[in-house]
Image (cartoon, grey):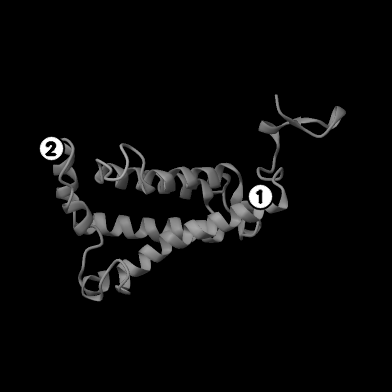
Amino acid sequence: MTTIGRGAAAQHLEKVEAPGSMLTKTAAKALAVLRISTGFVFLWAFFDKTFGWGFATPSAKAWINGGSPTKGFLSSVDVGPTWLQNFFHNIAGTGWANWLFMLGLLGIGGALMLGIGMRIAAATGALLMVLMWTASLPVATNPFMDEHLIYAFVIVAIAATGAGLRYSLAPWWRRFAPRWMW
């Protein structure tokens, strides 16, 4: 049993109203930097795929120039069960897959950067990363673990620790957003 406070004022951690209130200032700052940095990774991927800034996406393959943000990655899946390969190949480059992927990158990145909608960002971000991990199996440098799973764990940890509550727009967001959108 973990509690905070002493004597009659002691409370179980699970019942504390403000998650993250137990963090030290240093821990809160470190988690805020981790949250913002992770959000930047998602937003950068969105903007690079949209405008082709030449980092991961050349200008000629930019989404605004008619390129597909999902075609290259999903059409190159060549391992795993045949049904899984077929699934990824069939959705590669489709309009709905492109839009869902790009809206996911934008929404997850924006939510993490601003510290709002952390529950939704954690669920959708983890789902996106696990799907990308599945499409990249088998992992080339490790029998199981790769950056997609690490990002999924990081996003969930950020939301679970209340890292969006400090150094963010969360106090403003919580005044009007329904609780499930926190």
Secondary structure at numbered mark 1: helix
Q: How many marks?
A: 2
Secondary structure at numbered mark 2: helix
Residue 149 placement, left or right of 141: right
Q: Looking at the rendered structure, which numbered label has been put on residue 82?
A: 2
Crowd around label 1: few <14 · some 14–19 · many ≥20 (10 Å):
few
- Is any part of residue 147 visible from this angle? yes
Query: Residue placed at 71% from the left, 45% from the top?
Result: 21
Q: Nearer the viewer, residue 153 or 102?
A: 153
Q: Does 106 sit above or below residue 125?
A: below
Q: Position of residue 182 (x, y in %)?
A: 56, 48
What is the three-letter code of the residue carrying label 2?
Thr
Q: Position of residue 10 (x, y in %)?
A: 80, 30
Query: Residue placed at 24% from the left, 57% from the top?
Result: 70
Q: Position of residue 158 (x, y in %)?
A: 54, 47
Q: What residue did someone put label 1 on? A: 27
